[in-house]
Amino acid sequence: MLKWLMLMGALASTASAATLTVVTHDSFDLDKALVAKFEREHDAKVRFVKAGDAGAMLSRLILTKNAPIGDVVFGLDNSLLPRAREAGILEPYKSSALANVPAKLHLDPSGLLTTVDYGYVALNYDKAWFEKKKLPLPKTLEDLATARYENLVVVQNPATSSPGLAFLLATVRHFGEDRALKWWSDMRAGGMKITRGWNDAYYTDFTRNGGKYPIVLSYASSPAAEVFYATKKLGDSPTANLLLPGSSFLQLEGVGVLKGTAHRELARAFVDFLLSPAVQADIPTRMWVYPARSGLKLADVYRFAQEPRDATSNVNGAASLVDRFTRTVMRAGR
């Protein structure tokens, strides 16, 4: 009888638990034990909805804003925040946990998006491929656009991918808008592949994973990830950063409460949770970006990651820039 009552109590508890829906990009990854702890502490269930690369995820959230598909969104960054703000898909929440995040990393003073991590979008190259071909590395973005490096680069579409947009913004900072779009058009005419998202570029088209392109747009921490996931112990990374002047971008990634949530307090608790010491410590070797919270020690493998000196974080005009990019680069053909 006692067991039956306990079983009924457990079932009743499960039935009454609120379900928090968290919309994320495809690269989101978090220790399941941490998520389970959050669920226990808040008598809730957490459901994750992966909605493509960050740019595609934002487009979906805008299209569904009158019938929100979730309560929280993780993975929008500084390059996408202006578009999210304009679309009115987020509601403000200022987490007290932000006190542990350096002010220079704060995303938005109104609290629409709270910084969880940061990283550097950067070109990477396959060291073995270049050694085998005895091809010297380019030294500038201008070099990269010459015939010598035709058909060697794969990047992501700025309209659907946050790294792609970050790279576009970096090139605009370097060249100015008109010359940057001309550079992209020239690169595309020279065989640069533009994929919809990061996963396709890195895991399908990059030569390290069986593809045809030895230069890929990724993160400055990706060489460290290559060592971490290697099946055999490595003393050096098989990939390296190609930190050409004007090619790197400081990306601030955040979490926000979606307007229209039916679980506002639970959504806010999840924002706080992502800034907790345990989650922040889990991020660097799971999503391969730096934790926003200060004072955490990185794994030793991060000695293979670099922090570019000239990375920009300027996002002025990002939304109109994407429209112009789509018209002048993607629809222009080759």
Image: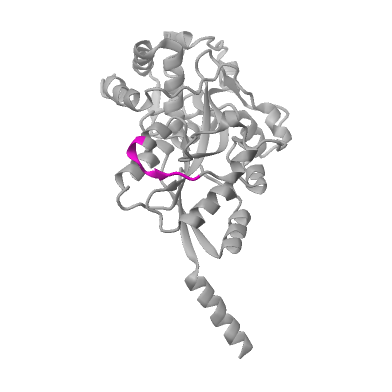
Q: Quadrant of residue 322?
A: top left
State whether residue 35 is above or below residue 193: below
Whether residue 241 is visible, yes or no, is yes
Q: Which residues are magenta?
A: 86-93
Q: Is residue 83 located in the magenta-colored stretch of the structure?
A: no
Left/right placement of residue 60 relative to residue 297 reads left
Whether residue 30 is visible, yes or no, is no
Instruction: Give the x, y percent position of residue 140.
Output: 51, 10
Left/right placement of residue 177 relative to residue 134 reads left
* Quadrant (top left/top right/bottom left/bottom right) for the N terminus: bottom right
- Residue furthest out toward the bottom: 1
| Residue drawn at (58%, 55%) of the image | 35
Please name whichever residue, 77 or 82, is drawn nearer the observer in this view of the structure.
82
Please name whichever residue, 324 or 65, is drawn nearer the observer in this view of the structure.
65
| Residue drawn at (38%, 27%) of the image | 194
State whether residue 82 is above or below residue 51: above
Image mark count? 0
Please name whichever residue, 29 or 322, is drawn nearer the observer in this view of the structure.
322
Instruction: Give the x, y percent position of residue 103.
Output: 59, 31
| Residue drawn at (53%, 73%) of the image | 13
Instruction: Give the x, y percent position of residue 83.
Output: 36, 34
